Image (cartoon, rainbow, N blue to C red):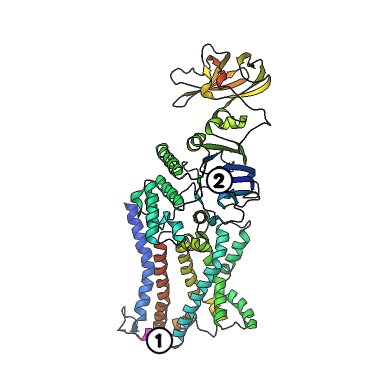
Amino acid sequence: MAERRLQRAAAVLLAGAFALPLAAIVVRAFADAWRAPAIVPQQLGLRGIREALSGATLEALTNSLVVAGVVTAIALVIGWPAARVLGERRLRRPAPVFLLLALPLLVPSYATGEGLTEWFLRIGLIDSLPGLVLAHLVLVLPYVILVLIAAFGPPLTALEEMGRSQGLGTLSRFRLVTMPAVRPTLAAAAFLGFLVSWSEYGSSLAVGGGRPMLPVVLLPFVRSDPQVASAISLLFLAPAIGALLIASRASRSPL
Amino acid sequence: MSAALQCSNVTVSPAGTPVLRGLSLSVPAGSRTVLVGPSGAGKTTLLRAIAGLAALDDGEISIAGRSLHGVAAHRRRIAVVFQEPRLLPHLTVVDNVALGLRAAGVRRAERRRLASDRLAEVGLGGFLDRRVPGLSGGEQQRVALARALCAEPDLLLLDEPLASLDPNRREDLRRLIIRLQSERALTTLIVTHDRAEAAELGDSVALMLEGRIVQHDDPQTLFERPASAAVARFFGASNIVRGLVREGRLMVADAEIPAAGPDGHASFAIRPEYVLVAGDGALRGTVVEAIYAGTHVRLTIACGSQRLQADVRTGSAPGAGEDVRVDLPCEHLWRLPDSGSVSARG
């Protein structure tokens, strides 16, 4: 009994730790006038949202959405076969591959981005959408592969063998057996991949200097105009929550 | 629609080392053949090779005289019931059974009708729209059986179909398998490690040891006229008596007993249930171990250097340490063929 109560208290505390800063941002975003030492804003309004949805910020929002979407799609397509090989333990020495995969996660992304900038300048990819996609792919791919590995292995192979012995060709086997089994993990990998790209700051700054991305645009406002910064933060949050909802719905369908 | 299966000189090495070594086996059309052997003998590997799930290094597998070389697994018309049911958890029972029909483009109403007929046959008529996760292990295995039949295969492969069931359900599923198989005269190859199950399920039984078929006969022959000491041991004829035969009498452990066959050194096999422990037996021995096995007591008796196992009724069993007289009835003493003249239908 006491233990259950303690667990509940801990859960409430944890939820509060996440929710309170969020609540502060929501209030700040709609506070047109909020002078110290007042606890609540003197005047509520939409100035922050209007600023956040205008000019460079709107462009940054579109850029970030496009890059994150494209990067996630490519990462899933490239990551699938790699995750399959690793998940089915077909490599005799998987350790070096895992190290290579983890490398972009260990090196600060600004450093990775700077390294890429050198080359992108030479091959004309700097400040371009393909350049940003490539730079983000380097960081997103490891996450996607590492999550996707969980979908592959003996249980899936067993089902696919069953499909073969039931007369299912490659396509119908993929549609009726493989895809339904992989879908929840695929959704989780897509969710994580999207968010990694969406919130990527370092390489966006290094490679995409001329093209505004949402995290890059957000930062200057944090000092100069907290209300706009808060409003952008809310925009920042929107697709994340959307992706979370889609992912949780996709993973709820059994296996 | 049923067809004969022929495996000739099949060699398969799933992980580099050969598991099947030049195996040959023929399964006549419409027969129910059991492949039996200890675990690790390569039974499942052979099943996988026949189904097209494991590649051949050498040899040939053919159905109705047509080679399966280069034929993809999904085009072989061979249905497999795996050891685990391998059902798709996101589909209902009827959709699982109709999986192959769906891929073949059969209309929804038609495949539901066909699948529900198969489900009724396995005694799951009311399970059409149930979900897989709620089913018991036995029910799942029946769904897998219905799915295999739904594809109307030329050949049915069953891998340890009764292994995961408790004794009472085994009996039901065993009857069901035999009924469904004989109604269709469907060529069926069943894998098991259990010799009793092999005898109960098969109209012919092939014993596999270390990647080869060592004897292929009807069940009674395997149990009572084994081709070698290894076959005798696998089928429970655990007593191998070696000795010199002269003028119809076998010299064993300081005694002479009647035995058939020409003069010379020979090995005989006798099942423990045929060994008589009686006051007028020709052999003298001492009980070294008595194990209560529920339906009988298994005695291990030392007769000089010869060890014999005898199954006796539970009421009258002597205890360990007692001196007993043992008789080996001539009619149950099977003279093993000299090695080299081993016959097998394989």
Q: Can residue B328 be seen in this view?
A: no
Q: Look at the magenta stretch and give its main secondary structure.
A: helix
Q: In this view, does B226 lie above or below A96?
A: above
Which quadrant is home to the C terminus of chain A?
bottom left
Circle 2: element type: loop
Where's residue B305, x and y in %?
A: 63, 19
Where's residue B57, x and y in %?
A: 65, 50
For marks 1 and 2, give the CA distance: 79 Å
Residue B87 covered by magenta stretch: no
The quadrant in which residue A36 appears is bottom left
Where's residue B6, x and y in %?
A: 59, 45
What residue is pinned by disc 2? B4
Residue at the spot 61% in from the left edge and 77% down from the top edge: A116
At label 2, the amino acid type is Ala
The quadrant in which residue B339 appears is top right
Query: Which range is magenta?
Result: A46-50
Q: Work out whether residue B80 or residue B136 is closer to the camera in this orientation and state it.
A: B80
Where's residue A119, x and y in %?
A: 64, 79
Circle 1: element type: helix
Residue A255 appears left or right of B68:
left
Is the C-beta separation of discs 1 and 2 under 8 Å? no
What residue is pinned by disc 1? A51
Q: Is residue B239 visible?
A: yes
Residue A47 covered by magenta stretch: yes
Judging from the image, mark 2 belongs to the subunit labelled B
Q: Is residue B344 above or below residue B60?
A: above
